[in-house]
Amino acid sequence: MKYKLLSFARQVGLIILVAWTVVSLVTFLIEFVPGSPATAILGETATQEQIDNFNRKHGLDRPSFFLSISFEEGFEWHGLNNRYYDYFAGLLRGDLGTSFRTDRPVLDMILERYPATIKLAVASMLVAIGIAIPLGILAGTNKGKIIDNFASFIALLGISLPTFVVGPFLVYIFAVQLEIFRPTGSLYPEDIILPAVTLGAALSAILTRMVRSSVIEELGEDYVRTARAKGLSERTVIYKHVLKNGLIPVVTILGLQLGVLLAGSIITEKIFSWQGLGLLLLDEGIAKRDYRLVQGCVLVISLTYILANTLTDVVYRWLDPRIRLN
């Protein structure tokens, strides 16, 4: 019991540390982006009075961090009178701040878009699994044959093509030429197909190679020969025994790739105008220099990535009870 409590406390501490580090880095780096939020949002024709009022309203007239360095004044300590402290004090109250552009709570804006991003990530993962497992099993059970070579070629092709190439290609084929789907948008249920295939294609290529390697390795184990000697069908041996034991490294990749899907969905959402968190981050956050929105989006993405890794650990123990989490 004591060990479990310590393990849980360590996991919570790690989550807090990673979230703090990510948001701190984003806060630090965004200060070096040329231009100011007031100019980006109010426009180049804004008067100095309008800019001053904007900065005062959103606290931009205050120092960014606890300490500032300048060549003229040297080091200057600001104590708690800085935007960095205010932001994290707000986080402890569950407040992600207010958007500079819309004056809406950042949390509300994220909650509107977050389900669309999660739906796209899950759909992409289902596409990847649906392609990779059958193809990987076929390749692994036919090592060195034509099917194996074909699967390896498809996997290599999928890894080599980035989403910003696959996405426009799918739009041209299925939206422009065949007119089966709409090129952009997220209004109708079928709109998720092209972006999900775009994201899932690269992941399926990686998973196919993993499944193939796992199947080939497991087929050489003693328990497979024992199962065959008992008269079990090849299908039962493969899908009931080999696949379950070979899924452990595949689950590792799936858990880690969920974070990659969330990051990759930023580009994909832009290509297909999918109204998710990535498009919000790009168009409303970074483009408008909306500090609070950028910080909130990155925080949610990082926490989702951490949660995905935690769930991966839980699935580890379900697949193989011998695994104990450190």
Image: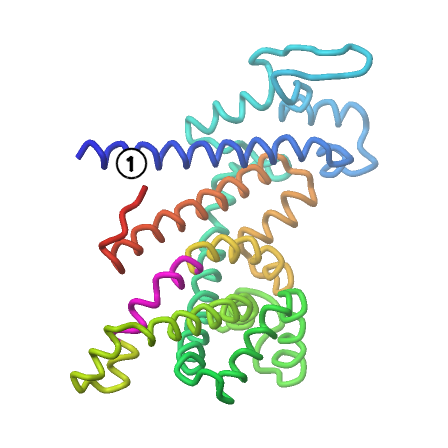
User: Residue at image x 59%, y 55%?
Assistant: 266
Highlighted range, magenta:
240-253
The residue lying toward the viewer, choosing from 202 and 137, is 137
Residue 33 is left or right of residue 154, and the answer is: right
Q: Confirm whether the magenta stretch covers residue 250.
A: yes
> Residue 208: image x %, image y %?
47, 72
Left-right relation of 184 to 239: right
- Which quadrant holds the N terminus? top left
Q: Is residue 98 above or below residue 132?
A: above
- Name the quadrant containing residue 132: bottom left
Q: Name the residue: 46% across, 46% down.
A: 111
Residue nearer the viewer, 285 or 109: 285
Residue 238 location, quadrant = bottom left
| Residue 188 is a magenta residue | no
Looking at the picture, the colour scheme in use is rainbow
**Looking at the image, residue 108 lies above or below residue 152:** above
Residue at (66% x, 43% y) in the render: 286
Viewport quadrant of the C terminus: top left
Residue identified by numbered label 1:
7
Q: Amino acid at mark 1?
A: Ser
- Report the residue at 27% width, 60% height from top: 319
Which class describes the residues within 10 Å of circle 1: few (<14), some (14-19), or many (20+)?
Answer: some
Kind of element beneath mark 1: helix
Say which quarter of the image contains residue 73. Answer: top right
